[in-house]
């Protein structure tokens, strides 16, 4: 054999070996789906900092999630070092509305310094969801961070399974999304069942809402609460859209829809037409199921929220929780103009809605949930200071189980098998491995949130107040958060009774830092 042929044969043999390994390994979905050539992506990622520094873009310039943000999520999910060296590369001096968390020099709590201290910390909700209205199955959510609504159909079966199993491992709640409750949701994680305008999972053969079917469904699975979807931040005013190519026989069966035709949900509910009838319907569902019932909505005109607070102030009817979805939130498919320009982003949205309920004396009776890039601790701090009790994460959870932000969700060509029904691409995602990564991400988020809150001198993120954050508008203009958002003293924190109960149940469970041993001459 000629030397050149021998080298070529060895090269082909080597490539064949790499391809075979890529196809059978389960760690990287991208390599399973694209053997050999997928390594190019990891090579580019590895030398990315150098390329961006000299050729392309900075770490904070990409959207919707920057390289720094994605890197923190990936490293957290893999339990790798998620620290940063050489200081911040954020444009602190010139970033309008840049939040600054104020640490306390002396406080009764201090954050632990160990890299993994607090990784298994329990951070439950400061409020008992549904207790204020006496729901039979009121409960205290075990995690302040939970998995947001993403339907089976929009995401693949293995992706839903990874999210649910990961939620179980992390003690978090998993929202089903409006696409119904599939077998992939039944992997042990506690659920919030979402009811959309098409009533998938709880409708009759004519597509009408069926209360009996809803009762049977929630009794057949670990459903802890029911969320009525009014709108979502990425496409408010429009119903859900599942492109025809993503509809498999299983999805067709679960939803009761034809295949090969876009599944377009109505833009409005058929069961109610105003706040008054909506509250009647909410109470009907709560009475029949015993579960807490809430609403999810983006924020546009304020009249809906004013009327909701006014009608709930009587006390006879009301929602148990309100999920505010920011306009910067994600979706599987939406017109660009809706994703880009319709509905307020989270901070403006939440701070517009919360005062209506605070002024009516209702804020302590409602669990407030935030959504819209809150899977990053610095954003979440603002949400809790504004009055959120829980946060939901969607795209951050997708990133944790392998999403590479290819932004192909609407084309059925997601390269990592997360947001596609293509059998070849789906096979690349190993739900057992990815569920652990999701749990790692959730736990890392909670660990970092605990450190931030203890540095600010409080025991729990739900106890963060407007006094703990200031916002920068240029280099010299620093304003208190309460002034920026127009909050009154006492807004944004749980009731005194809830704070006292939270202190009691967390006693001895939250890790604290400390100091070196005191000398015999120590003061105080």
Image (spheres, rainbow, N blue to C red):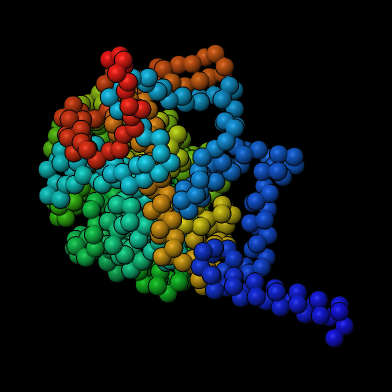
Question: Where is residue 416 shown, x and y percent of the image?
Answer: 54, 62
Q: Residue at x 12, y 49 (%)?
A: 136
Q: Left or right of 242: which side holds 198?
A: left
Residue 375 occupies which quadrant of the picture? top left
Q: Residue at x 56, y 54 (%)?
A: 404
Say if residue 181 shows up in the picture: yes
Question: Where is residue 449 shown, x and y percent of the image?
Answer: 38, 37
- As drawn, 82 above or below 458: below
- As drawn, 417 above or below 317: below
Question: Where is residue 249 shown, x and y percent of the image?
Answer: 42, 74
Residue most toward the front? Answer: 520
Q: Residue at x 26, y 21 (%)?
A: 490
Q: Left or right of 31: which side holds 154?
A: left
Q: Residue at x 18, y 43 (%)?
A: 130
Total residue callouts: 0
Say if residue 244 shows up in the picture: no
Q: Left or right of 84: which side holds 197?
A: left
Residue most toward the bottom? Answer: 1
Closer-to-camera residue (194/20)? 20
Question: Where is residue 521 shown, x and y percent of the image?
Answer: 31, 15
Closer-to-camera residue (511/452)? 511
Closer-to-camera residue (258/97)? 97
């Amino acid at each position: 054999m000629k030397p050149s042929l021998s080298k070529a044969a060895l090269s082909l043999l080597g490539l064949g070996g790499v391809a075979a390994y890529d196809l059978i390994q389960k760690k990287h979905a991208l390599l399973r789906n694209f053997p050999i050539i997928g390594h190019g992506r990891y090579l580019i990622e590895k030398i990315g900092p150098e390329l961006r520094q000299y050729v392309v873009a900075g770490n904070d310039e990409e959207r919707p999630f920057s390289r720094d943000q994605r890197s923190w999520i990936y490293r957290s999910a893999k339990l790798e070092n998620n620290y940063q060296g050489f200081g911040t590369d954020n444009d602190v001096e010139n970033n309008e509305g840049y939040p600054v968390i104020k640490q306390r020099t002396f406080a009764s709590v201090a954050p632990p310094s160990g890299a993994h201290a607090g990784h298994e910390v329990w951070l439950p909700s400061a409020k008992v969801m549904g207790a204020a209205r006496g729901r039979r199955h009121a409960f205290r959510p075990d995690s302040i961070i939970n998995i947001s609504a993403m339907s089976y159909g929009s995401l693949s079966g293995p992706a839903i399974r990874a999210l649910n199993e990961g939620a179980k491992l992390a003690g978090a709640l998993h929202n089903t999304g409006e696409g119904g409750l599939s077998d992939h949701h039944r992997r042990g994680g506690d659920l919030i069942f979402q009811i959309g305008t098409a009533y998938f999972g709880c409708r009759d053969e004519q597509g009408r809402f069926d209360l009996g079917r809803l009762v049977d469904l929630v009794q057949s699975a670990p459903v802890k609460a029911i969320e009525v979807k009014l709108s979502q931040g990425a496409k408010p005013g429009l119903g859900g859209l599942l492109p025809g190519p993503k509809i498999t026989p299983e999805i067709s069966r679960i939803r009761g829809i034809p295949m090969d035709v876009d599944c377009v949900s109505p833009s409005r509910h058929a069961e109610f037409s105003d706040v008054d009838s909506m509250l009647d319907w909410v109470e009907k569902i709560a009475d029949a199921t015993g579960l807490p019932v809430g609403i999810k909505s983006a924020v546009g005109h304020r009249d809906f929220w004013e009327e909701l607070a006014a009608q709930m102030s009587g006390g006879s009817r009301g929602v148990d929780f309100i999920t505010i979805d920011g306009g910067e939130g994600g979706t599987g498919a939406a017109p660009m103009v809706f994703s880009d320009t319709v509905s307020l982003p989270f901070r403006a949205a939440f701070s517009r809605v919360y005062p209506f309920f605070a002024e009516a004396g209702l804020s302590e009776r409602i669990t407030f949930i935030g959504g819209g890039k809150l899977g990053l601790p610095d954003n979440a701090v603002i949400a809790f200071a504004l009055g959120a009790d829980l946060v939901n994460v969607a795209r951050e959870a997708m990133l944790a189980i392998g999403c590479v932000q290819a932004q192909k969700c609407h084309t059925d060509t997601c390269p990592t098998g997360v947001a596609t029904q293509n059998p070849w691409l789906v096979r690349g995602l190993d739900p057992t491995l990815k569920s652990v990564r999701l749990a790692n991400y959730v736990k890392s988020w909670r660990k970092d949130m605990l450190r931030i809150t203890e540095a600010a001198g409080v025991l729990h993120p739900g106890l963060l107040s407007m006094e703990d954050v200031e916002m920068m508008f240029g280099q010299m203009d620093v304003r208190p958060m309460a002034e920026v958002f127009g909050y009154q003293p006492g807004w944004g924190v749980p009731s005194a009774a809830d704070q006292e109960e939270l202190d009691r149940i967390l006693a001895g469970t939250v890790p604290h830092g400390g100091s070196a041993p005191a000398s015999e001459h120590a003061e105080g």
